[in-house]
Image: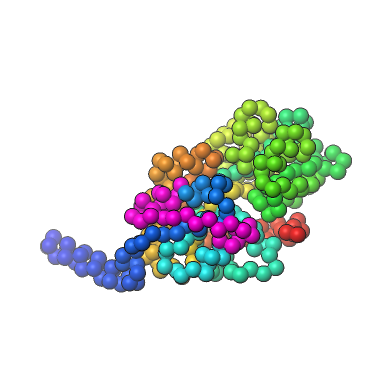
Amino acid sequence: MRTKLLGGLLAAAVIAVAGLPAGAQSYPNRPLRLVVPYAPGGITDYTGRLLAKALGDGLGQQMVVDNRPGAGGMIGSELVAHSPPDGYTLLLMDSAIAVIPSLQKSMAFDVLKDLQAISLISSSPLVATVNPSSPARDIPALIQHAKSKPGGLNYGSAGIATAPHMAGELFRLSTGAELIHVAYKGMGPAVTDLLAGQIDLCFGSVTAVLPFITDNKLRGLATTGAKRAAVLPTLPTVAEAGVAGFDVDIWLVLLGPAGLPKPLLDRLNQAMRSALATPAVIEGFAKVGAEPRFTAPEATAGFLAAELDKWLGIVKAANIRLD
């Protein structure tokens, strides 16, 4: 009886393998390419290189990072969208992919139709941060201060359509606070001006503001995610502080070209699950205030669709333009 059972299982396995597309049976049998659509040296590039090592180890092949910066990440994203769906060209992209399409008059690809969602990778909240001289010590006081100050408060961001900008606009629309956007070429210059008192606040990345909050050179009021940040556990979320439903994260996602065969999609998804559980990745993420965030392909696609709808509404309500 046992021999027959084992024989049946073996036969089923052989049939399953034979049913795979020809390329999937030995996938991967050559190095893979992970497109990072930003310049080397930034946090997305750092994360990409960390993941490329872990994913490559898990898949048994080298994964090479290919930096393709430009157009807010859209140049690299388009490259992957138009690549063959063979599992050898993948994209690591951030939350800008849910915002930029709402600002473009036309796109060379459709995020949901031309890209295959594989898994979310990580999430990291922003921190509502003010200069210590500010009278605001919590979110309600910040809202009151913004409404009472003639002309409102100036808030700095890393540039138009970046997560710090979108967080500020969502906060303004959600609370009625008078906020004036000041766009910088990166979060570093914005934080420098906040330290000098040239602007009133920012919704800064953890890496940009945490050292100054720790040294009491800046005051963190709240984090912007759905739950409290592990690196700032004493700070409430903006939603906890009274702005119901407020949720803004810098999240990362792994994508491939649309049409990936399901066996390859499943293989990549499970490789991501394993990579996110490795100590090197967990420790590396912690250094930049990020937490692993694994999801199944279907859940990832649903999340992307919801984020695209969410930010389309914010862009329209705030009348945000790239020019």
Specify whether residue 271 is in view: no
| Picture layout, residue 187 above or below residue 10 | above
Q: Is residue 257 left or right of residue 238?
A: left
Specify whether residue 89 is in view: yes
Residue 249 in the image, given as x and y percentages of width and height: 60, 48
Give the quadrant of residue 125: top right
Q: Which residues are magenta?
A: 50-76
Q: Is residue 65 covered in magenta?
A: yes
Q: Is residue 135 covered in magenta?
A: no
Q: Residue at x 74, y 38 (%)?
A: 193
Q: Residue at x 41, y 59 (%)?
A: 32
Foreground pick, 111 / 280: 280
Q: Is residue 132 left or right of residue 76?
A: right
In the displayed image of the protein, which residue is found farthest to the right? 150
Residue 276 in the image, given as x and y percentages of width and height: 43, 47
Q: Is residue 256 left or right of residue 245?
A: left
In the displayed image of the protein, which residue is found farthest to the top? 215
Q: How is the image coloured?
A: rainbow
Residue 173 in the image, given as x and y percentages of width and height: 75, 51
Residue 38 in the image, given as x and y percentages of width and height: 57, 54
Give the quadrant of residue 8: bottom left
Q: Is residue 67 left or right of residue 178?
A: left
Foreground pick, 238 / 159: 159
Q: Residue at x 45, y 49 (%)?
A: 51
Q: Residue at x 62, y 58 (%)?
A: 70
| Picture layout, residue 229 above or below residue 93 | above
Give the quadrant of residue 261: bottom left
Q: Quadrant of the N terminus?
A: bottom left
